[in-house]
Image (tube, rainbow, N blue to C red):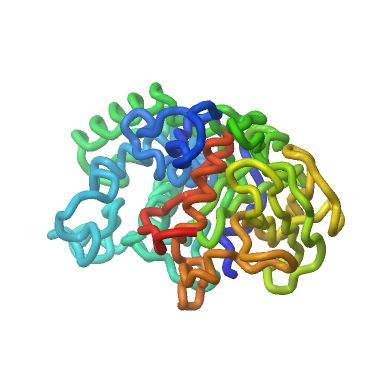
Amino acid sequence: MWRLSAVLGLVGLVLALLVLAAVAGFAAQACTTPAGPVGGVPAALVPIFAGAASRYRLGPEGAAILAAINYEESDFGQSTLAGVHSGTNSAGAAGPMQIGIGGAAGDSWDTVKVAAPGDPPGQAPSVYDEADAVYSAAHYLARGGMTADPATWQRAVFGYNHADWYVTAVLARAQSYYQHGLAAGQGPAAAGATAVSWPGQQKCSVDGGGYANPFADVPPGHLVPERIDMGVDYADAGADPILALGDATINYAGPDPGWMDGDSVNYTLTDGPYAGRYVYVAESVTPTVRTGQQVAAGQEIATFAEPDTDGIETGWAAGPGRVVAKASTLDQQSHGSDPGANRSYCGNQFSALLAQLGAPPGLPEGRPVVGSGC
């Protein structure tokens, strides 16, 4: 299936990313933090602002400035004013970042538009898509001379919207966001790179199951959470380890032509609340176990096969052998050109489990959950 993005490189990012609530039926003890916004910024949008700031080298406060612009222009895309979700405002600006597509606002969109990580290959950027709009706005600011140097901010933001009051409002709000934890790291960011650190990046267990965070041994700043689809997508530019969720039997480990980049590991959990369920890790993985092997929770089963490939997907499998996602057997997948375009119930449930174990949840991207069980 189409992947969220190929990740070409990573930069450090200090980011308070708040995780989802615990999975129903599990005990309260787990590596979680309360759900909610980051200094007033919706948690689901934080990786978008951070990734865009990193790609265009806008400096540590770049993510906060992008968030402040998004708030001023459309209340984080929640505004119902003309031009936010369709058409234009009276000046010809459109989308959640209100970029000019004609009229008094000019036609800046055609000169700055970029596809955000996650767009299917060949899909044109949309001014009404939150991620496309934010990445394009970051491109706009970079073209206007914005860097990590605070001396460049006022001019770049004024170039975005020619009003002194606007510059003052954006920079004041951005400072508040930054002080409350929204920050992007500096470094040689590559296109499409987003690095995330999260609270509780450690091995955790769930009472009654002994389950482990599959990414507990990934170094801080390496793991990139991507979209929730049939499972949960992640990327990592290094060959970092992927661990077994729980005690398990490996059903299959090897080539899997049904997935991009062609390898998968499929295992059956043998204990805990999900005993008997099948778990898959597929796409850009290099298996480090063999079919029939018994593994313990937290034991390495594969590594990321980055760089130069897409990321991985992990979630509930329908059965043993080469991987078929359970979501697809429940008809939760999209029937368009991108079968992973839906945020499936199965993927959403698996994302919540990973978050409870201390991993970053997948990105909901503002999409509704499709399906009612898994």
Q: Is residue 15 above or below residue 292?
A: above
Residue at screen point 75% across, 43% down: 240
- Residue placed farthest to the top in the image? 179
In this view, the residue in front, 112 or 35, is: 35
> Is 287 situated above or below 332?
above
Q: Give the camera-side residue of 76 and 93.
A: 76
Position of 179 compared to 85: left or right?
right
Q: In which image quadrant can residue 110 be found?
A: bottom left
Q: Residue furthest left?
A: 90
Farthest bottom residue in view:
336
What residue sits 23% from the left and 48% below the top?
74
Q: Quadrant of the N terminus?
A: bottom right
Residue 58: x and y in percent read: 48, 38
Picture quadrant where residue 93 is located = bottom left
In-front residue for pair 87/27 = 27
Residue 260 is situated, as x and y percent measured from the top left of the image, at 68, 68
* Residue 39 x, y percent position in the rendering: 35, 28
Q: Give how far across and how far down residue 208 sits, in percent.
A: 60, 34
For this rendering, which residue is in front, 67 or 359?
Answer: 359
Q: Residue at x 29, y 27 (%)?
A: 172
